[in-house]
Image (tube, rainbow, N blue to C red):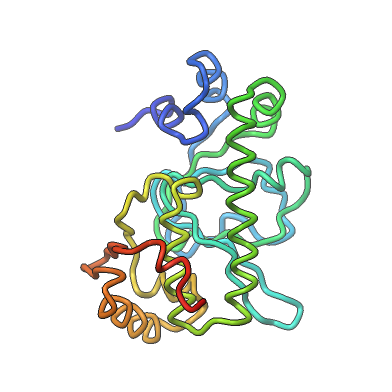
Amino acid sequence: MTSKIDLVRSAIWAEELTDDVIERAARGISERHYVKDSYICHRGDRLDAWTGVVTGLVKMSAVALSGKALTFAGIGAGGWLGEGSMLKNEERKYDLVALRDTHLLLMNRATFSWLCENSVGFNRFLVRQLNERLGQFIAVTEHDRSFDAKARVARNLSWICNPVLCPQVRGVIEITQEEVGHLAGISRQVANRCLKELADEGLIALEPGLIRPLAVERLASYGA
């Protein structure tokens, strides 16, 4: 079994940190497990922890006043989320749902704030993370208004392959058709059709419970 300190050392944000800083950070991190379809937090909650996905898949979503559901992102293994809410010290503006059994790391506010105040390397990572997330959310707004189901599926797959936002995915996405549907806002049947068409186009390879993206850049710009 991997120890907590080893999990922290392997985190993407720890790459530029010294051993003593990593050990200080690990003392402020707890582990938590969520079963499939359980809520990690609801919109309006104060989840007072920066959150990392060790294993599993987390959906970040919200429901508009009109009743329309909008998925902002799917967070896979190695991804961290919630830095904006932590920096602004505010309640969450979205729901977090575990789409499968999920293992999380939760960094408390005191530790997050200490790293922000004392680690140049940690702040460099946060700038990269926020920049990637901003680009993702701009693209979400664009594709939700303009793109069909297949383009939404393609782009969601490309985001899960983002080396900053989901660094441990590494070219193989462990995901079901149902989970793809949840992220793209479509039914499992439609997701199945879209995946088969993307496979026929040579952009992905399908295996039971797995998707291998073969052309991530083309997935990221699909439908444009």
Q: Nearer the viewer, residue 178 or 214?
A: 214
Q: Which residue corresponds to the image point at 28% horizontal and 81% vertical from the top-left?
A: 196
Could you tell me which residue is drawn at 61 percent across and 58 percent down? 135
Number of numbered labels in the structure image: 0
Kindly identify the residue that appears in the image at 45 percent across and 74 percent down: 222
| Residue 131 percent coordinates (x, y) | 63, 48
Q: Quadrant of residue 60?
A: bottom right
User: Where is 118 relative to 53, above or below?
Assistant: above
Please provide percent x and percent y for residue 62. 65, 68
Q: Which quadrant would residue 189 be assigned to in this image?
A: bottom left
**Screen quadrant of the N terminus:** top left
Q: Position of residue 157 (x, y in %)?
A: 41, 65
Measuring 44% from the left and 44% from the top, which residue is drawn there? 78
- 119 vs 93: above or below: above
Find the residue positioned furthest to the left. Answer: 207
**Whole-percent x, y for residue 98 in the image:** 48, 59
Q: Nearer the viewer, residue 125 or 61?
A: 125
Question: Image check: 95 left or right of 38?
Answer: right
